[in-house]
Image: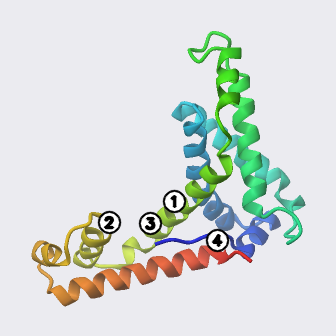
Amino acid sequence: MSFDAETRPSLIRRVQSGDDASAWDEFSSIYRPVIMRLAMARGLQPADAEDLAQQVLMSVSRNIRKWNQDPSRARFRTWLQKVVRNATVNALSRSPKDAATGGTDALTRLGAVPDDSSGAFDREWRRGALQWAVQQVRGEFQKATWDAFWLTAVDGLSPEDAAKQTGKSLGAVYIARTRVMQQIRARVTELLEEES
């Protein structure tokens, strides 16, 4: 499943309003894992990546009201990517001098790494959106239906082997896989809108 999309404007508006806790919870559940994976890919330890994610989300909560959707300016995802990158560089540059990564040497190595932050952010964004959608629809299906989907779509098992393992007919395995995929796509569509 592939998609190239942007955070839906309705979620951003709900978060900007500042009084919708469920919007913030949804926003955080989508972006916190993305921020953490990006931070760890840049060399932060998991606990430091968690701290960084918290700092970024706090910064977003303070500044999101100022962000306006404008087709001539950066997309929300681009704005957030810059916030994450700046926070990561700041976190790496203020590491204690006795840290195993070293002071100036670590910054020099970081500066020598080609900046693929845009591509990395987009990959992590897509991965996070897909994981969120899977978590959202998991409870909507019976175990055998979910297993038929998972075995064929994720684990790569043949539909015939999945049918034997789940006790479903071959046709039921195909239907299960299709139904679950449709629900995941629907959730991703709810979460995202096509970029213009």
> Mark 1 vs mark 4: which is more N-terminal?
4
Ranked by sequence position, the earlier of labels 1 and 3 is 1
What is the distance, in whole Å, between disc 4 and disc 2 at their CAs?
Answer: 22 Å
On the image, numbered disc 4 is attached to which residue? 5
Question: Few, some or many C-alpha atoms within 10 Å of disc 3 (few <14, some 14-19, many ≥20)?
Answer: few
> Badge 1: few (under 14), some or many (20 or more) residues near its Cα, within 10 Å?
some
CA–CA distance between discs 2 and 3? 14 Å
Q: In the displayed structure, would residue 139 be above or below residue 47?
A: below
Determine the CA span between mark 1 and mark 2.
Answer: 14 Å
According to the picture, the residue beneath numbered tag 2 turns out to be 154
Give amino acid for label 1. Answer: Arg
Count of numbered tags: 4
**Viewer-side label of 1, 3:** 1
Left or right: where 131 falls relative to 7: left
- Which quadrant holds residue 135? bottom left
At horizontal 66% and vertical 77% (from top left) the residue drawn is: 193
Q: Vertically, is 189 above or below 117? A: below
For the residues labelled 1 and 3, say whether their Cβ atoms are less than 8 Å apart.
Answer: no
Q: Secondary structure at mark 3?
A: helix
Instruction: Name the residue rendered at 60%, 39% in the picture.
Output: 39
- Farthest-out residue, top: 98
* Left or right: 148 in relation to 178: left
Q: Which residue is mark 1?
A: 127
User: Quick one: label 4, few (<14), some, or many (20+) residues within 10 Å?
Assistant: some
Q: Report the Cα–Cα distance between label 1 and label 3.
A: 12 Å
Q: Earlier in the sequence, mark 3 or mark 4?
A: 4
* Residue placed under numbered mark 3 in the picture: 135
Quarter of the image that includes the C terminus: bottom right
| Residue drawn 70% across the image and 75% down it | 195
Q: Secondary structure at mark 1?
A: helix
